Amino acid sequence: MGFFRKQQERMAIRLLAWQYQRMNAEIPPVDQLEAQAFKLVDDAHKIARERGKNVVEILKDLVEDIKKR
């Protein structure tokens, strides 16, 4: 796994944890956060390839969608 991909996953973990805190929800264990972050980054890359958007902006949108669930 590349350096940038790992950085994106770390950022996604921080965004997820922050979103859980904002919702006053219990933050899942680290392994679950890592799995969610991996999926988010993977989805963001797929969307970026299809639509040509910035991966970071897509990650923010995906994390925001979690809040709505």
Image (cartoon, rainbow, N blue to C red):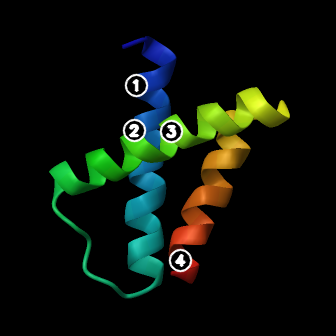
Residue indicated by mark 3: 41
Q: Is residue 7 visible?
A: yes
Q: Which residue, given by chain and number where applicable, does mark 2 sit on? A: 10
Give neighbour class at mark 2: few <14, some 14-19, many 20+ (Cα, 10 Å): some
Q: Contact (CB < 8 A) between labels 1 and 2?
A: yes
Precedes in sequence: disc 4 or disc 1: 1
Report if residue 53 is visible in the image: no
Expressed as whole percent of the image width and height from the top left, the position of residue 48 reads 73, 33
- Which amino acid is tagged 3? Val
Which is more N-terminal, label 1 or label 3? Answer: 1
Q: Are marks 4 and 2 in contact (CB under 8 Å)?
A: no
* Rendered residue at 37%/63% (across/down): 17
- Look at mark 4 in the image and give the residue it sits on: 67
What label sits on residue 23 in the rendered view?
none
| Labelled pair 3, 1 in contact (Cβ < 8 Å) | no
Task: Identify the secondary structure beneath mark 4.
Answer: helix
